[in-house]
Image (cartoon, rainbow, N blue to C red):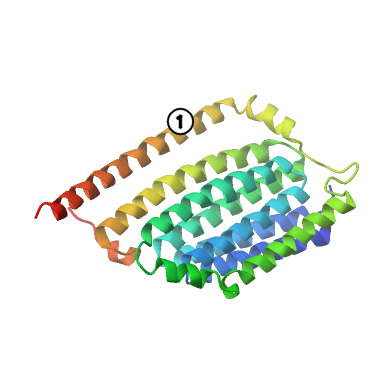
């Protein structure tokens, strides 16, 4: 152990994840929802790295690299969809886009 | 070391709290970048320097730039100059600047004390991560590359249709 309470790293990860989930629930602006999703992905990465540091294995950081790839793809596609949403509705409010067509 | 961890954690949590309560998207982005930097400091303290570097370079560097691009595309107009001036007021950047200064002071302190990797302490160095990444996790790397390709094709498809539609609208505006 390197002098850092690693269990509390997991607690911090859990708190960050809870904050991200709360952000998804309370915000209706789609950009903020995407940012909250990023917070949650980041918290998951923090949990992985903490677990990897706990057992002194590189696997946690390997998983963090994969999580980074997933986050990058998610942001790219998500932001393209945000541009479509703005194009159709002239707003970023997701409640305006709550109805399906067809 | 333990105190540094607690300070970085508190900075991360405060910045994240401000992200989900901010009213302006740019303020939220500034605070989110501070939150990412704080998590990078936590990684460094945990003995994961490779993850810390990736967090700063890819997350705070590359992914956040995408957000900034889209935000700027969605807010064109004549009010832009006035808004730029508004953003230069200290009230906008004081909060993130203070939090980032705390993190910078912490980093300087750690580097000056030379305890970023305490002697005999656990540290998973980048070479080990690379060996694992291209050893037992090779299939995962291939899958990540396929995922990145799928994301590239999907984004290109979406934005190609959007661009064509905008071109048509522009022509329709010009013709009559």
Query: For residue B49, what is the image quadrant?
Result: top right
Kindly tell me whether residue A72 is visible in this rendering: yes
| Residue lying furthest left | B176
Count the marks: 1
Query: For residue A85, what is the image quadrant?
Result: bottom left
Q: Which residue is mark 1?
A: B146
Query: For residue B35, what is the image quadrant?
Result: bottom right
Which residue is drawn at the image coordinates 80% and 41% (left, top)? Answer: B123
| Residue A23 in picture, x, y percent from top left | 50, 65
Question: Between residues B14 and B165, which one lies in front from this camera angle?
Answer: B165
Q: Secondary structure at mark 1?
A: helix
Which residue is drawn at the image coordinates 67% and 60% (left, top)? Answer: A12
Q: Vertical placement of B81 versus B125: above or below?
A: below
Question: Between residues A92 and A33, which one lies in front from this camera angle?
Answer: A92
Is residue B53 shown left or right of residue B71?
Answer: right
Is residue A77 shown left or right of residue B171?
Answer: right
- Chain to which the residue tagged by mark 1 belongs: B
Kindly tell me whether residue A98 is visible in this rendering: no
Which residue is drawn at the image coordinates 44% and 52% (left, top)? Answer: B69
């Amino acid at each position: 152990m390197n002098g850092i309470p690693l269990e509390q790293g997991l607690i911090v990860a859990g708190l960050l994840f809870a904050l991200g989930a709360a952000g998804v629930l309370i915000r209706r602006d789609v950009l903020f929802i995407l940012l909250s999703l990023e917070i949650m992905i980041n918290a998951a990465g923090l949990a992985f790295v903490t677990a990897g540091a706990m057992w002194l294995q590189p696997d946690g950081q390997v998983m963090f690299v994969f999580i980074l790839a997933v986050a990058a793809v998610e942001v790219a596609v998500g932001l393209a969809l945000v541009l479509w949403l703005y194009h159709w509705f002239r707003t970023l409010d997701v409640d305006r886009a709550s109805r399906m067509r067809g | 070391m333990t105190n540094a961890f607690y300070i970085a954690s508190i900075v991360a949590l405060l910045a994240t709290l401000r992200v989900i309560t901010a009213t302006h998207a740019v303020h939220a982005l500034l605070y989110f970048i501070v939150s990412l930097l704080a998590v990078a400091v936590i990684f460094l303290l945990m003995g994961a320097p490779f993850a810390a570097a990736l967090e700063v370079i890819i997350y705070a560097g590359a992914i956040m730039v995408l957000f900034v691009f889209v935000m700027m595309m969605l807010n064109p107009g004549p009010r832009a100059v006035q808004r730029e001036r508004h953003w230069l007021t200290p009230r906008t950047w004081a909060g993130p600047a203070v939090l980032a200064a705390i993190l910078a002071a912490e980093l300087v302190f750690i580097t000056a004390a030379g305890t970023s990797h305490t002697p005999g302490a656990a540290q998973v160095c980048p070479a080990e991560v690379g060996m694992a990444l291209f050893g037992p996790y090779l299939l995962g790397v291939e899958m990540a590359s396929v995922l990145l390709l799928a994301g590239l094709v999907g984004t290109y498809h979406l934005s190609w249709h959007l661009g064509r539609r905008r071109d048509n609208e522009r022509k329709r505006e010009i013709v009559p």
